[in-house]
Image: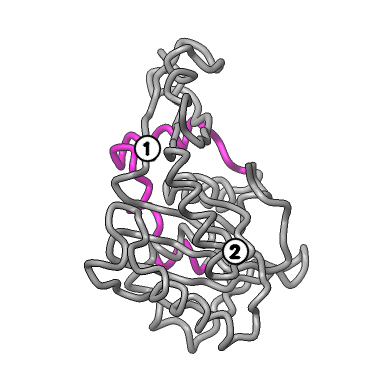
Amino acid sequence: MWHKKNQESVSIVIHENMLSLAWLQWPDQARPPHLKAYKTITLQSSEIVRGIIYNPTAIKTIIQEFLMRHTIAHIPVLCAIKNSIIIEKYFHTASSELSPEIKEFFKSKVWNYCHLGSTIDHDSFVVYACGLPREYMFHYRLFALFAQLNLLVVTTTAMAQFMLYKYIYGAAFRQSQLSVDLARHTYDLTPFFTADSITRVVSIPSDLHSSWQSQAPMLASALGLFVAKEVS
């Protein structure tokens, strides 16, 4: 379940060997989100393995140093994960209703899904579904308590990117165009998000430009988490 719209929050994006932190703020309805701070850290091989945080003290220190530096210790935290423990599938169904196959996929998992519209030839509907075994979700909740984080959301980077895609297009969003872009990028929107596309929807101070441009997909996921309530 997505969070209610926050005026500001911190997005944490976790890959197998990388962690990024983005402090985002919404000044008002008339202006785009503002990136207040951003940091990416390359992790050691033993800190997070297949999604399991084996060195919680080190990860807590990284996150808390970021929060304390910017005096935002109690800010809501949103998290997107990309690693091998996440189970992600694209289902082709005859209708927009959830099929028995999808419902079976959801058993024993904490899950989320997103209707992506019809295929290019309009012969079926596409549903993206992601699942996290319940013990892993419990693992992240325990880590949030240990690290003193106000964790509101745990989802996948792909889900966050879908939300950003819809936000970028706004009222002009069409599922038919999403189908074309998904087919073009083999159901991976990561290449869609460039530095140019991101700077069109978020205000980024000049002193932060060098800290994120080489990790545009990471910031795309972070921004997708932040704007998700606007488009879900």
Q: Position of residue 121 (x, y in %)?
A: 38, 18
- In the displayed structure, would residue 221 be above or below residue 166? below
Q: In which quadrant will I find the C terminus?
A: top right
Q: Give the camera-side residue of 130 and 58.
A: 58
The image quadrant that residue 209 belongs to is: bottom left
Q: Is residue 228 left or right of residue 125?
A: right
The colour style of the image is: one colour
Residue 7 vertical placement versus 94 (above, below)? below
Residue shown at 33% from the left, 34% from the top: 183
Q: Nearer the viewer, residue 59 or 129?
A: 59
Stretch in magenta: 172-199
Q: Picture coordinates of residue 117 (x, y %)? A: 50, 27
Residue 182: mark: 1
Residue shown at 61% from the left, 43% from the top: 172
Q: Who is closer to the viewer here, 87 or 64?
A: 64
Dividing the picture into quadrants, the one containing residue 216 is: bottom left
Q: Amino acid at mark 1?
A: Leu
Membership of 9 in magenta stretch: no
The residue at 46%/28% (across/down) is 108
Rendered location of residue 69, percent (x, y)? 56, 88
Upstream in sequence: badge 1 or badge 2: 2
Tag 1's secondary structure?
helix
In the picture, which quadrant includes the N terminus?
top right
For the point 77% across and 68% down, the residue is: 28
Q: Is residue 156 above or below residue 221?
A: above
Instruction: Give amino acid for label 2.
Output: Val
Please name the residue that numbered disc 2 is placed on: 77
Please name which of the two marks, 1 or 2, marks the residue nearer to the observer. 2
